[in-house]
Structures are given as structure tokens and as C-alpha cells.
Image (cartoon, coloured by chain):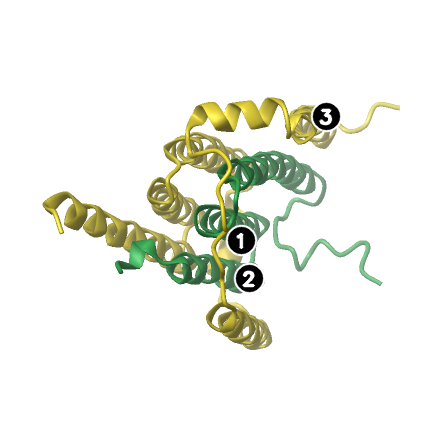
Chain colours: A green, B yellow
Amino acid sequence: MMPSDQLATYLLLGLFLLIFGIYGMIRHRTFVGMLISGEFILNGAALNFMAFNRFVAPDPAVGQIFTLIVMGIGAAEAAMIVSLILMVFHKYRVIDPDKVRDLKG
Amino acid sequence: MSFYRYLAEGLFFGFIVCIFAGAFISLRARQLMNSVLGLAISLLGVAGLFYHLGSPFLALMELLINIGVVCVVIAFGIMVGPKPDQAAEKRPPPKRNRMLAAGACLAASALLLWTVLNTPWNPAIARIGDFTIRHLGESLLHQFCLPFELISILLLVAIIGALIIARIGRYGARE
């Protein structure tokens, strides 16, 4: 059986994308870098949905629709976060997350 | 096994290499624009895997939405937004951050790896429908009509909200 016919291959790739996204989210020093890492996490989830849809689910439309919803949420999230970054930049003149700390308790 | 089967497997491994290469480019890049490029390469690999999973429609949507919209929006954000503060990205992260990131990733990956390898994933006994776009469209407009409408409203609200927030950021809130 080839690797492209096995569920575990896709799950491990989704796991890699998730782990990479978490690592990048903590490591990056700018808001935009964190946004990029968030996209990796979302795509890991989408890949998992598609893999389960192909190998386990009874109705193949369900996973595809879930993946479409994940993509829609990703697009909305990216648009919102970019506009928030622009607003933070105009207000604070920085995009360093360490310096935007008005609400820090 | 036929020649085309080998070709498909070769493409499959090519897409996996795309995902890994894009992820490492994105992590190691010194400039944010290169980081976005890495994201785009990685998403190209994900789109190829969607094709292998039997859904060419989703592969095209991935190219159209995630590479064509999300990456371009992030690139716009980088270009319109602050230039000088890219120095923040060049500064190495503090040691505490790096340790925290490595610890969180190792713990999560160990747990999930154990789950993936030790769970018996049983395939469904019977399949309803097939992988055609016709079946997808019918389910989207019959069974999953509410999520479909909700995602449209979410996108509309997000676009209007993004416009308003960006405008307030530029001109200040009007009293």
C-alpha cells in the first residue's frame, strides 16, 4: 500500500503543520509573523478534515464543506487581523507585540 | 503498477517536500515578505494533497482563497504597514520564548503522535454519495444550508469590520 493511500500519512502532515504553527506563533516577534503561523494551524486542521473525509467518513461532502468553512474563517481572520495591525501601528507606531501592553494586568 | 501511478506518487512526495520547505522558509526568513512566500509554497503543497484526497474542487479553492486572497492580504499588510519595525523580526527571540516554544511543541506532538498511531481508524461501513462537485453542491444547498449562509454573513461582517477598523486607525474616531 502506497503512502498516499494511508490515513496516517495525512494525519502526520497535519500534525506537522499544527506543531509548526504553534512554534512559529511563540517564536515570531511581530504580529504579521504570528498571523502567518496562525494560517499554518488552520491549514493543518483543514488537511485533517479532508483526510478523515476521504478515509473514514460515510458522506464525502461533509469534510469538504467543513474545509470550505475553515478557509472562509481563515480569510475573514486574515482581513480582520491585518486591519487591526494597521490600527495598532497608527496608534502606537510599533508592531512589536511586546510594546503594546496597555491592557496588561 | 502503472507508470501513471508512479507519477502520482512522485507528485505526492513533491507536494510533501513543498510543505516542509515552505514551512522552514517561513520560519527562518529574515524578512516578513519571504515568510509570506514560504506560507504560499506550503499552501501549494496542501492544495496538492487535497487533490490526492479526491477533491480537485477543494484544491482549486485552496489555491484561490488561501494563496490568492490570504497571502495577498498579508503581503498588503506588510507593504502598507510599518517598514522600520521589521528590525523586531530580526532580533533573536529571548531564550525563555524559545524554550517555551520547544516545550509546548514537543508535548503536543508527543500526545498527538501517540493518538494517531494507537487509534484504530475504522472506515465507514457504507458510503452515501460520492466525491463529485454535484453531490457537494447539493449537500451545500440542502443539508448544510445554514453553515453556508453563516459563512457568507461572517465574511460580510469581517469585510465591513476590517474597513471600519482600518479607517478609524487612520483618521481617528469621529465623535
Residue B2 shown left or right of residue A9 in the figure: left
Element type at marker 2? helix
Label 1, residues with CA under 10 Å away: few <14, some 14-19, many ≥20: many
- Residue, x 24% and y 51% (percent of image)? B14
- Name which quarter of the figure residue A79 lies in: top right
Residue B31 shown left or right of residue B115 in the figure: left
Where residue A96 appears, as percent x and y from the top left, is 61, 54
Q: Are tags 3 and 2 found on a single chain?
A: no
Nearer to the camera, A60 or B85: A60
Q: Chain of mark 1?
A: A
Where residue A88 appears, as percent x and y from the top left, is 69, 42
Between label 3 and label 1, give the one nearer the viewer.
Answer: 1
Q: Amino acid type of disc 1?
A: Ile
Q: Chain of mark 2?
A: A
Element type at marker 3? helix
Task: Kindly check if marks 2 and 1 are in contact, taking CB atoms under 8 A apart as contact.
Answer: yes
Give the residue number, with chain letter if any, for mark 2: A22
Between label 3 and label 2, give the one nearer the viewer.
Answer: 2
Look at the image and tell me in which quarter the C terminus of chain B lies: top right
Give the residue number, with chain letter if any, for mark 1: A41
Figure label count:
3
Where residue A87 appears, as percent x and y from the top left, is 68, 37
Where residue B28 appears, as percent x and y from the top left, is 39, 60
Q: Amino acid type of disc 2?
A: Ile
Furthest toward the right, the residue is B175
Give the residue number, with chain letter if any, for mark 3: B164
Q: Amino acid type of disc 3?
A: Ile
Label 2, residues with CA under 10 Å away: few <14, some 14-19, many ≥20: many
- Residue, x 67% and y 31% (percent of image)? B147
Nearer to the camera, A39 or B175: A39
